[in-house]
Amino acid sequence: MPDNTPSSFAPQGFTQPWRERLPMPAAETMNAQQREAADALIAGPRKGVFGPFLPLLRSPQLLDRVAQLGAHLRFDGVLDARIRELAICAAARHVTNQFEWLMHAPLALNAGVAETTIEALRAGARPKGLPADEETALDFAAELLNTHGTSEPTYLAALAQFGEPGVVELAALVGYFVMVSWLMNVAHTPANTQGAALQAFPL
């Protein structure tokens, strides 16, 4: 059973003293653009205002564009849900973002990623014995996250596995989830710690 006591997992954003820096604005303080942005999120597939959209409410136009990009990558992209969710988990683990990890690790399991794969990622280890497409996706994501690009062998393997649209989408997906994770790390956006939370590196 994972130890999720407050001292055992990394607080969102790491820094102390810890406080939520950019929480949900009080309803009476929101302007018309903020209320419109919040209402659109509630009416859309997300069904609420949470995660990166809490700090993004300070910039409603940016929120709208970020939400549209995220919705396309998550709901309208060409990648299989299993590959998409695995790549999101890899990005969340890389930047130790509790919110995205705790949201997407169960989605990855539901999409067919093995529990041993998710637990290895959570612990900071490289999963073993992966299906070929998952191996290729993790190689691509890890190389991109660690070197800010991909070697020719890694690129060609991803191209053969996912095609040009899939390679573009996979790179954009990793970048998107690092971006929103950074935003939440800066904002100290809290995460629901029900589940196997992430510890700080090194473990």
Image (tube, rainbow, N blue to C red):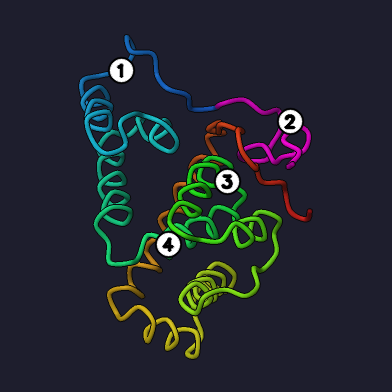
Q: Quick one: 39 or 64, which is closer to the camera?
A: 39
Mark 2, residue position: 6
Q: What stretch is highlighted in magenta?
A: 1-20
Q: Position of residue 131 (x, y in %)?
A: 52, 75
| Residue closest to the eye, 85 or 190 | 85
Asked if residue 187 is positioned above or below residue 30 in the image, the reply reads below
Q: Label 4 belongs to which residue?
A: 82
Q: Dot 2: within a 10 Å radius of its alpha carbon, few (fewer than 14), some, or many (20 or more) residues?
A: few
Q: Which residue is found at the position 62% from the left and 75% from the top?
A: 129
Tell me where residue 154 appears, x and y as whole percent: 49, 84
Secondary structure of the residue carrying tag 2 is loop
In whole angstroms, how far apart are the C-alphas of marks 1 and 4?
38 Å
Which residue occupies 31% across, 37% down?
Answer: 46
Q: In which quarter of the image is residue 170?
A: bottom left
7 versus 143 height, above or below: above
Q: Label 1's element?
A: loop
Query: Vertically, is 175 above or below 165?
Result: above
- N-terminal-most mark, 4 or 3: 4
Which class describes the residues within 10 Å of circle 3: few (<14), some (14-19), or many (20+)?
many
Of labels 1 and 4, the one closer to you = 4
Q: Mark 1 points at which residue?
A: 30
Image coords of residue 202 (percent x, y): 78, 55
- Point out the tag, 4 or 2, that comes first from the N-terminus: 2
Q: How far apart are marks 3 and 2 (CA)?
A: 15 Å
Q: Residue at x 43, y 56 (%)?
A: 111
Residue under label 3, please give it. 97
**Residue type marked 4:** Arg
Measured in 3D between alpha carbons, the distance from the residue under mark 4 to the one under mark 2, in whole angstroms, is 30 Å
Left or right of residue 102: residue 177: left
